[in-house]
Amino acid sequence: MTAPIAKLSYWGVRGSTPTVDPATWRYGGNTPCLELTAPDGTQFILDCGTGLRMLGSRWGMPNGGGNPETHIFVTHYHWDHIQGIPFFSPLYAENNEFHFYSFRSKFLGRDSLKQVFEAQMALPYFPVDMSAMNAKRKFKEVEGGDTFTIGENKITARWLNHPQGCLGFRIETPAGTVAYATDNEPGDPKLDESLRELAEGADIFINDAQFTPEQLKTTRKGWGHSSWKEGVKLAREVGAKTLVLFHHDPDSTDRMVDSLLRQAREEFDSVFAASEGMVITLGSAGAGDSVQAHMPGMRTSLRKEAQFRAKVTGVTEGGKEFQEETVVRDISLQGALISLQNIPQLQSELQVTMQTPGENGSQSSMQLKGYVVRVDAGAEKGQIAVGVVFTD
Ligand SMILES: [Zn+2]
Ligand SMILES: [Zn+2]
């Protein structure tokens, strides 16, 4: 018997507004959209930010996944969580069926989400009208406190502290539990308690980490967002196993997110910063080590086959520092694929010192700092293929 597996894919991780600034490429610029495939095959989509467009395009490809029946949870109606809807191509195919779950907004009244659809697609804001959306769409109103089941999965919705309201969702699958708590600010005792209930013992706790702890106390107080520190504190309190920092500020460059992640990792064992294309599988390695993360292929072009002898220092998955010598075979201006015996921690920093042939046969060395974006089994036994993106 094989263990049940759930797969959580990150299609959009940026908060507030999409970014295209190259300094934000590594974590990604699309606004919130996650996809969770439960062991029973039920497909969930969490939020409809601009990441939803990419998810839809992938459905069209052979073996691209996609399920004729999908359950979509919309946490609230701020732009960054609904903007992807008109660009989600599966909505225009009549064989598809979507079940939407969201709350009744006091600003919109009955059928809030349906109204959001219509308003977004009204002329002159969008050129195609609603009649072209041929997929079956069913809308269900949920509110904080509701619990229900879909297939083998138990869903809990709770209110979070955010302007105009926001729902957090907890999805318990046979492979593990995901708590999705984007857009929330600590400080309201009742809603803080709701958040704790959502995250209680979760395998994956995705929490708003838009601001620094300092911003949260001062200039950004009352904006409806949180920080890595609050996430760590709560994850500890309720025994959540892995914390995912989410809803990155549009003004946060990759370097800034790196730094937030580094600080969070100093205080909590298992933390990732949500990154576009990242996939987390739950339940794959049995109890104790049930969460595995994979990062997308490097967004690099102009890769060159080369052979540089290099010395690599970094931190292993187990948190130990290591140093080893290797040969760098595949390099580009943005990154490299390096084969190592140590397994470096995903999203940790590596120092790569390469020996390059200098003039007149002399040797010189080039030192680069990189971030681990990918760890795979290597081509040779005992070797790990490690993808790094150079950061300077
Ligand atoms: Zn948001
Ligand atoms: Zn919001």
Image (spheres, helix red, strand yellow):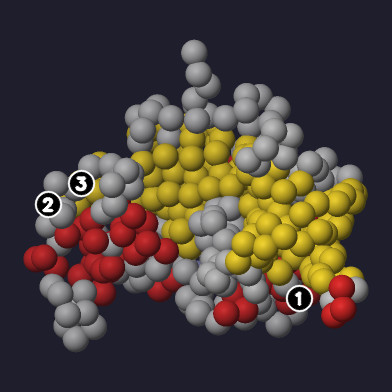
- Residue 184: quadrant of the picture: bottom right
Q: Position of residue 375 (x, y in %)?
A: 66, 47
User: Picture coordinates of residue 322 (x, y %)?
Assistant: 89, 48
Amino acid marked by disc 3: Glu
Identify the element where label 2 is drawn.
loop
- Label 3: how many residues lie within 10 Å, few (<14), some (14-19) or many (20+)? some
Residue at the spot of label 1: 392
Of circles 3 and 2, the one toward us is 2
Question: Which label was assigned to residue 94?
Answer: 2
Relative side of 43 to 111, left or right: right
Q: Secondary structure at mark 1?
A: loop
Q: CA distance from mark 3 to mark 1?
A: 47 Å
- The image quadrant that residue 63 belongs to is top left
Name the residue furthest top.
1
Rendered residue at 48%/49% (across/down): 9
Q: In the image, residue 304 lies at what x, y percent?
A: 60, 66
Mark 3 element type: strand
Q: Which residue is located at x 77 percent, y 62 percent?
A: 308
Question: Which quadrant does the C terminus fall into?
Answer: bottom right
Q: Amino acid at mark 1?
A: Asp
Figure check: 97 above or below 305: above
Residue that label 3 marks: 97
Q: What residue do we see at 35% from left, 36% from top?
A: 42
Q: Tag 2: Cα neighbours inside 10 Å, few (<14), some, or many (≥20)?
A: few
Q: Nearer the viewer, residue 197 or 256?
A: 256
The residue at the point 70 percent across, 27 percent down is 288
